[in-house]
Image: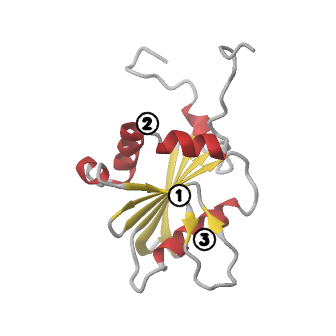
Amino acid sequence: MNNENKIINLMNDAMFKNLVRSPEARNIVLKLIQDLTQISFELLQKAEFMGGEIPKAHINEKGKISDVVVKIGPVKIILEMNQFYTKEIFDKNLQYAYAWNTRESHLEKTFLINFDAFNVFHTDKPLLDFLMRDKDEHEESKLIISYHLILENYKNSLYNISEE
């Protein structure tokens, strides 16, 4: 069988998890996280990349598993590949962030970084960020920040100005 022409789908959860957690991609992933969260690269280099199992609040609670969790002290960064849109996907991902945020007796800073392979926001922006706000745009909390990288809006981006 000829393996040269095989295309690997990086939007598949298993492939995304392997790529993001691989030592070869570590610096690229950390640079992306640094750009979004403003956490220093030196601190991020000490981060622990964990599986995505979310701690249960109750013994009878259904298990929740996010794609990848990056832990830096009390800060958690959840990386989620969203290949397909469903009406529940964003609520489900936010449940992961809330579960990590409230799992201990004190609240922790949690970042949720969504890699969206769809554009339900109907925007040409490649990046959206969300904070908890009221209808008058007053910020309620900065403990949970959600980012959406709209992957289709990154098509045909140039690398080093002249290279695709």
Query: Hey, what amino acid is under mark 2?
Result: Ala
Residue corresponding to mark 2: 25
Count all numbered tags in the image, as a single digit. Answer: 3
Q: In which quarter of the image is residue 108?
A: bottom left
- Which is more foreground, mark 2 or mark 1? 1
Q: In this view, does 85 lie above or below 54?
A: above
Q: Name the residue under label 3.
A: 95
Q: Where is residue 64 in the image (x, y as percent from the top left)?
A: 64, 68
Q: Is residue 110 left or right of residue 118?
A: left
Q: Residue 51 carries which label?
A: 1
Task: In the rendered view, tell whether residue 13 sits above or below residue 97.
Answer: above
Q: Which of 90 and 120 is in front in this view?
A: 90
Q: Is 144 situated left or right of 95 in this image?
A: left
Using the image as rendered, state which of residue 162 and residue 14 is in the foreground: 14
**Residue at horizontal 55 percent and vertical 42 percent from the top:** 18
Q: Which residue is drawn at 48% across and 79% down?
A: 103
Amino acid type of disc 1? Answer: Gly
- Nearer-the-camera pick, 108 or 150: 108
Q: Kindly report the distance in space between the C-alpha atoms of the residues bearing marks 2 and 1.
A: 16 Å
Q: Residue 18 carries which label?
A: none
Q: Residue 127 at what x, y percent from top left?
A: 50, 46
